[in-house]
Image (tube, rainbow, N blue to C red):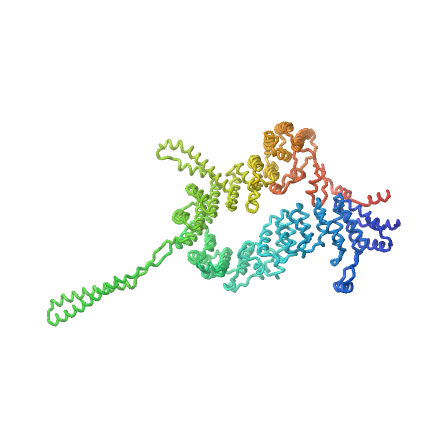
Amino acid sequence: MTADNEMEIKEAFQRAQKGHNNKAKLVASLKSRYNKLEDKTLFHEEFVHYLKYAMIVYKREPTVENVIEFVARFATSFQSPPKTEEEQQQQEDEEEDEEDEEDHPFLSFIFNFLLESHKASSHAVRFRVCQLINKLLGSMAENAQIDDDLFDHIHQAMLIRVTDKFPNVRIQAALAMTRLQQPKDPECPTINAYLLILDNDSNAEVRRAVLSCIAMSPQTLPKILKRTRDIKENVRKLAYQVLAEKVHIKALTIAQRVILLQQGLHDSSEAVREVVCDRLLPAWLLRLDGNVIDLLHKLDVENCAKTALDTLKAIFNGKPTEELLQDRVQLDNRKLIPVDSLTCENVLYWRALCEFINAKGDEGDEILEQVLADAATYADYLHGYLRVVPVLSEEQRADFNHLELVMTKEFVAQQLIHLIGCLDTNEEGGRKRVLAVLQEMLAHPQTPSSLVSLLTEKLLTLMSDDHRRIQTVAEIISDVREPIMEASQPVDKNASRRQQVQLAEVKVRIMEAKQTLEDCITAQEFSRAAELKDSITELENNRNQILQEIAEINQPADKEIRSEKNDPETLLRCLTMCAELLKQMTIKTPIGPTISALMSSLVLPSIANAHPAVRNMAVVCLGTCTLHSKELAKAHMVLLLQIAQLDEVKIRISALRAIIDLLLLFGFQLLSEAAATQTALPWQSPDRQEEDAPAVAEDKAEDTAQSILVMLSEFLDSEVSDLRTETAEGLAKLMYTGRISSAKMLSRLVLLWYNPVTEDDTRLRHCLGVFFQLYARESRLHQEVVEESFLPTVRTLMNAPATSPLAEVDINNVVELLVELTRPSALIKPSTNTEEVCVHDYLAVRMCGEMLKDPTAPEVRLYAKTLSNLELSRDETVRKDLQTLLQQLVQVVKDRVCLRALEKMLNQLVDSREQAELLIASALQPVDVNADEAATEDPSKSAKRGKRGNAGQRKVCTAKGGRKTSRRAESSEESDGENVPESVSLMRPSRRAKTAALEKTKLDLNTLINQEANVS
């Protein structure tokens, strides 16, 4: 090759490094030069020679990126321009039996060179190889074709590189395989590799790269949905973006849609929530022609009303007010939805719209009047609908169609009741009408039981005075349980017949007397006639009395009486209203005569009811009522403890919640006071009782508290997950509020969190994960409890039998968590006392003591490794004691790994003392703040990840500004860039100095190329 040609290639590479140069012109001029050559071999070799300068640079320098872009453009410029569909079809018809046209020699040469280099030992070369293959394949036309053998070689090479130990290499390899996917092939190796990466790759950027390029298919969709729950925010965000752009809403099941919205709208990251609101929901609405009601149909609102409401709120937030009024549901002139047109979707939309406008306050009052009727009109509307909600008989409940219809009507009724909260009840007339309707529906026997709690809540919300609330609910409960009945006595037929006979006899005697009277008058026996006349009068009075009695018997007067109902349904309705009343009452409101009467006549008798639902609601009422009265809590604490151990699971959980709430409110002093009331013995003298009562009460209180803790500890081992979770949550609350301070109980919670048995219990894992972090960061006393639980936890895990689930727990992970939780720098308010011995000092001494007990124990290696992760104080006394212990350990420990770790720790203590003296002598030494910044990392999250490399360890007491990072740590922690050590600057440079330094850091390949040219 001539010197002119050499200058041509060299000049092209030099000019390609500068971003402002037109790469298309460079490609055209170099391609023109290439086409004129007869022998292309020398050109190929020279081109690759200059390309190698860029391929050995790993850092993403702009000049190198420009060169790579230029090479990709030049190589793909030899491809024939893309053909239209007609030309392609014509070519296929004409060359049906001919072989395919081979790839251009230069393009094949570049591919072969790259494929030969992909196994290079330098990670920079492997990275650039994968990047170039990615750009070459990406720059080809959509209908471009390559040789089958070349396709297979590229495929095999990239499948190897996606398992490279450097994340950036894996990223480029994954991107390079984008066009090698075959979504219709269930055994496609590329897609299988992608799925494996999504599930197992530890680097978030690699997972993001795969998400951005994976093809959609029934095989890949579940894996993409799983990434919406990824630990990294950026991965979750991209997963939602991919679903919004590539997946139709009809391709998802109802459960998948609901889970996506439920998790996305409540994600801890604001960026993820914005993607769901701004990308996913608009994309779904676009595919449904903007029909929000149709979107609700796709979500099955009856079973996920809360998620549907959150979705509607997110949609409303992105729309102006005028558009909201245009999209409102079809209301009639009364501003109500006609009863015949009510459906689950439109009534939920109506409720969400009214609540959204009502939340705007005074600004939304005028707008609300356009979408909701006044209070009195709406009350009549609600009353009319609730009266027609059917109540199913036992036979109808077996019919699924009847059951579905009633459930739909009840759901609509619930949404209409919720709308009461949006009504303007300031006007007295409308407010009274709403109250009257609510009271009437609560007392109505045909009102479904599922609506009682909601109706009671809305009724109590409209009343501000607790005494009025109690009186109103008590009257309704009385009407429901003791309704007024019209009682009538049955007609006695025998008595009626006897009275008829008596009446006939009296009539006969009257007729006989009248006949005799006439005969006496005719015979002029006037004295006899006078007697007969009196007798006739008496008989007539007797006849009238008998007629009145007969009339009363035939038409008896109805009487109103009250009869008590004790059927389970009635009791459940009354208890539900009572429970809602106790919840709405202010906690400081004392228990009055009315509540006491309800307790004695309704709640306590229902605890022994045979129906489980009645018993459960009675326990809820009892537990809520005891929160208002300490005396009541003392009296019924034992009853709640018995229920928590003996009844059905659901009722036991309700009793357990009540016990936890009582202990949170009153503390364990409640037990001592309750015991004090029962300690006085009747046969003892008053003086003797006063002397013995405190001691006996204290002993009984301790026994009761101990029995409660034993019961809770047993519940943690329960096979019932709900009971186990409720107990763990209760213990976490008691420990966080300071009611319990127990290292043993904390150890139990840590072991429960790591136990594989609780892997599927999301609520338990989330609750404990948040608790550990908040508890340890709250105060130093809490950290001391964690430190005390360290050794018992480790011993339990080390001694766990092979058959125990705890044998599968990673002990290193547990130790790392406990170390992170006890870091002094993790406290929300660190101690200002610099002389105070920190928790890690105690922990270090404890571990050294354990190692000295048995230097050959298997946990010695774990303790030795943990020592180097501790954040020790600067107290000289502690350091000297620790140094003495380490020197003793070095003499007795035989394990080489442990010995190296202990010697390293010992050297650090010696070096830190020497450097501390230097720091005292020199006040100009800069302070390294990197360790303090690293110490703010979330301890529970870091512990939940796998084992970290040395880069994750924090050493506070070292005096070196930098820290050497192992090769393994570099490869595992690397993301999209090179790990470059940062130097500590002594003063802040000026803007001009920063610009000059930035220019110096830019890499220029020209110097390397010129040096090579001079040497040659």
Residue 854 seen anywhere in this rendered image of the structure: yes
Residue 870 seen anywhere in this rendered image of the structure: no
The image quadrant where one finds the C terminus is top right
Residue placed most toward the observer, 925 or 107: 107
**97 is higher (above) or lower (below) than 858:** below
Q: Tell me: 387 left or right of 880.
A: left
Q: Tell me: 920 left or right of 293.
A: right
Which residue is located at x 51 percent, y 46 percent?
A: 722
Residue placed most toward the observer, 951 or 376: 951
Choose top left, top right, bottom left or bottom right for residue 550.
Answer: bottom left
Choose top left, top right, bottom left or bottom right for residue 754.
Answer: top right
Q: Position of residue 70 (x, y in %)?
A: 79, 51
Q: Position of residue 57 (x, y in %)?
A: 77, 44
Q: Position of residue 371 (x, y in %)?
A: 54, 60
Residue placed most toward the observer, 463 or 966: 966
- Tell how many labels: 0
Q: Position of residue 98 (x, y in %)?
A: 78, 61
Which residue is located at x 39 percent, y 32 percent?
A: 690
